[in-house]
Image (spheres, helix red, strand yellow):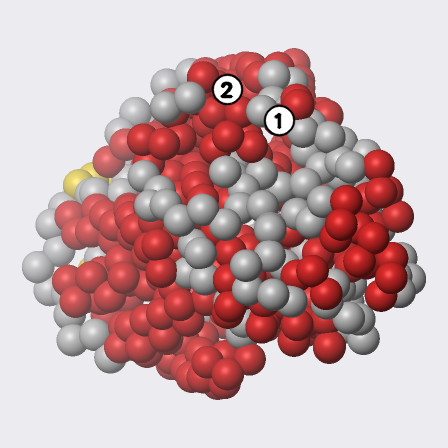
Amino acid sequence: MNFDQILSAIGGFGKFQKILYIWICLPQVLLAFHMMVSIFTGATPSHRCQGSPSFEVWNQSLSAAHVSPNFSLVESACFYSDVNHTRLIPCGQGWVYNQETFQSTTVTEWDLVCDRAGLNTLGSSIYMFGLLVGSVAFGAMADRYGRRFVLLLSIALQTMFGVAAAFSPNFIVYVVLRFIVGATISGVIINAFVLGTEWTCTKRRMLAGIITDFAFGAGYMLLSGVAYLIRDWRKLQLAISAPGFLLIFYIWVVPHSARWLLANDRRAEAIALLRKAALVNGRVLPPAVQVEKCCIAGGERRTSKVVDLIQTPKMRKRTLILFYLWFVNMLVYYCLSLGVSRLGTDLYMTQFVFGLVEIPARSLVLITLPFSRRLSQSVFMALGGLACLLMLAVPADHPNALTAMAMVGKFGITASLAVIYVYTAEIFPTVLRQTGIGVSSMFARMGGVLAPVINMLHNVTPTTPLLIFGTSQLLGAAMALALPETANRPLPDSVEDAENWDLRRPPPTQEHLATCEAPGPDQQHLQHLAGQH
């Protein structure tokens, strides 16, 4: 029996798996906190130089600077407005900040304005670089040391360094700590997702990605309320980090991936874990599996390397396509998010709506994925690309129409992101799954880092960013059609399985086992199945 048959036999989405999903969803709420908190902790409130005019006059001067040819200087220069003109002046007396919205931020504490405003942007870039480093490092570690170990390690490091960031004595220490937190976020995301995927039967494994996305969206919306109540950046940083200590019980409740244990020749541990899962689900582990030397696919011991992703022809083609899809998805997602951030005047309500709008996109994915991963990926990317191109036809004096079209694009790219997690995990074999997702995530982070640069082209020609977004997504939609269909197919365990995908057919007797909710077969039937395989 292969592993997917065993999962189905013991209840592929039973009580054991549902409890596991609770454990992998809870950290996603904290991830959303850490990912989005800089919107509040790093905000730049209205400010003025000591002895300068009031905040209102200062804000008018900034508005005047926005429409001047010196737009690019706004972030790095100091503007002063008097009765007749706006001019550039230094500020040697120190800064005074408007505290109506924020009691304090990293900007107000370390004066990251005027000639130091670039440091705030640099800090954000370093944080994104941490996400990139973590996606590679923790992905490779998980294939070697196991999903559970790296997940627990990432949560522990995220909590400790997140709390430490709240007590940073200076900006440099703060940036270093945020870099580490960013790296651990990638470790939690990819390991929680893969752990859920590898414990879920064929027809329900898409839930591993989508359900965790819903939890992330819930955290996205909840952060707005937390930040609204806590206006001091240090207290807010502490409030989003300290709850991680409550997850210490994960040491006792989060299981290993039995699939990973088998792929690494740790059969005794895998069988004991499968027996426990069967017991929790009210099933019986097939007798042929209960012996340590049972014949289960995917038991070869090997060390995975990044180069293994491109050594064979079919794996190479699929890997390169997936890398491109990840890059484009994240690039367009961040660019559109930055573009629609100007829709509302209330920062807290705007961020709440941004989290809310992603719920229907991910809900639609739940409906389409059971039919086809490949078509879902292609259609949602095409939707996002067409929406971006259609924005070129909307006049600039119709902001409501532009906003509506931008939201359609964000809807499409959000759904596409939900699909790509599931699709990638199903295409890469077990021995390379974590490494493949880690490197794919690295390309995604490259897209995130590049997004602000692409958005800056809007100052030169407003059509260029939209052309890039639209054409890149349409190209990705076409490339996705060259990938294999993975819906209702067993996961490949080795590179050979992936290369021979078209030759792999579910055995005839597996039909009734394909459904997670099928009644548990009796012992004689299990012995009959074991004898056939």
Q: Residue at x 44, y 41 (%)?
A: 432
Q: Are marks 2 and 1 in contact (CB under 8 Å)?
A: yes
95 or 467: nearer the viewer? 467
Amino acid beneath label 1? Trp
The picture places residue 161, in percent across and down from the top left corner, at 29, 72
Q: In the picture, residue 371 is in which quadrant?
A: top right
Amino acid beneath label 2? Lys
* Residue 164 appearing in the image: yes
The picture places residue 204, in percent across and down from the top left corner, at 75, 51
Q: Residue at x 20, y 61 (%)?
A: 176
**Left or right, residue 416 beside residue 464:** right
Query: Can you say whether 270 is above or below 411 in the image?
Result: below
Residue designated by label 2: 314
Residue designated by label 1: 501
Q: Residues within 10 Å of mark 2 (few under 14, many from 20)?
A: some
Disc 2 from disc 1: Cα separation:
9 Å
Give the position of the C terminus as an image quadrant.
top right
Q: Residue at x 83, y 53 (%)?
A: 528
